[in-house]
Amino acid sequence: MVITRKSIPRRTFLRGTGAVLTLPVLDAMTPAFSAEPQRPIRMGFIEVPNGIMMDRWTPAAEGADFELTPILQPLAQFRDRMVVLSGLDQQQSAARENEVAGDHPRACTAWLTGAHAKMTAGADLRAGISVDQIAAQEFSKDTQLASLEVGLESAEVLGSCESAYSCAYYNTISWRDETTPLPMENRPRAIFERLFGDVGLADAETRAARREDDRSILDAVTADVRRLRAKLGGPDRGKIDQYLEAVRDVERRMQLAEKQKQTDHDNLPQLGGPTGVPSVFSEYYKLMTDLMVLAWQTDMTRVCTFQIGHEMSGRAYPELGFGDAHHSVTHHQGDKDKIEKTVQINIFHTKMLAYYLDKLRSTPDGDGSLLDHAMILYGGALSDGNLHLYTNLPLLLVAGGVAGIKGGRHVRYPHRTPMGNLLLTMLDKANVPHVDKLGDSTGRLELPSA
């Protein structure tokens, strides 16, 4: 028997002036007669600010027979992959003696660290390493980037933001260690060039000139693409075409936003942010999540941390038909109009999450999709935004099928169970070497299993 299938190295790149594109997994990267290598597990952490209306989030029934609540309804097509988690707390969000206010910065700091934020407006910040960075330390042995920290609001606010708490606490949910918060990148172009630009092959002026002329990064690698396609079979050529079209689509949207230079779009008010950010929130969200999909598709990183908005975010959502600031309507004090506006914002966020999950599901990864090989934790660092509660947090784990986790379940844990127990369990499921403790964790959780 003659074997005609060719093999190319797993780390094959498309190179050109000012560009290096990592390829997604192709059949040709597995030698003939070799078993398909096990695809790596990716981890995503997505935080929404200002709490969630819990009576419209939490299913009434436990187990498999729960009904999707209004806020969860946009995720109906992913029900079989979802585990809704109730009863988990972050007690390190609570104020200590002589601490005043600061509920929001303490909450977002504790969410992935299980650590208490030191009350300071200076440079002497202190919290703890976050779960995403524990995973990143392990996964970075096999990836070019340890992690991506992505946000949809500026991280440039300095000084004190609430009481005596530094704005640095608001600007991130990711901590490299006890004293080092990692900034969330809110510029699409900066993320794109981190993934695909090669500073060693072209200076900033060359790359800027290419953008000015509306030339694609793909123009620089055309010759390499042609050579590679000649070596590939039909299915792999299809994967390459899909991937390159996704890269080009992201480029087109960035170029459009850069041309608009924050001018009005569809008569909607502008978002505050750097040049190149789409003026409509949903377009901004989709662009940033598409960049995260590309990062996973090419295995540039296996960890993405996504902060949809700062705690106390004053962003308005005119796409919903009203201009009220998010934080203000969460302090509703029982006002029905404000409650309904908060619910609409919460539903809007899960609609955006559904877009991201669908994109992952439609992106091939080995013998399945990126969604098949991902664990994504979504939720808030506060439950009741009106009362600033950090108990019974709104948490959703999308991981059905990963590491034996069975989706389509609502699980309620005993009162005062630390959220850190969930984070440790996720690390175990992702095959991160055993971590004894994270923040105030007390052990592991039992997740539904197949």
Image (cartoon, grey):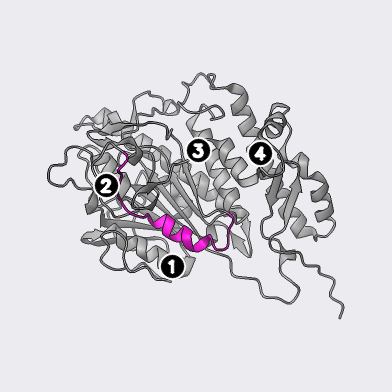
Q: Which residue is mark 1?
A: 429
Residue 303 lies left or right of residue 217; in this view the side is left
Q: Which mark is residue 249?
A: 4
Q: Residue at x 57, y 44 (%)?
A: 291
Dot 3, how many residues are within 10 Å of its Cα: few (below 14), some (14-19), or many (20+)?
many
Return the disc, 2 or 1, that comes first in the chain's sequence.
2
Of tags 3 and 2, the one toward the viewer is: 2
Q: Name which quarter of the figure residue 324 lies in.
A: top left
Q: Which residue is mark 3?
A: 285
Amino acid type of disc 3? Answer: Tyr
**In what quadrant of the picture does the N terminus appear?**
bottom right
Magenta span of residues = 123-144
Return the disc, 4 or 3, that comes first in the chain's sequence.
4
Query: Residue 444: x, y in percent?
Result: 31, 68
Dot 2, how many residues are within 10 Å of its Cα: few (below 14), some (14-19), or many (20+)?
many
Asked whether the residues under the numbered discs 1 and 3 touch, taking CB atoms below 8 Å apart as contact, a structural biologist would say no
Instruction: Identify which residue, 150 or 290, lies in the foreground.
Output: 150
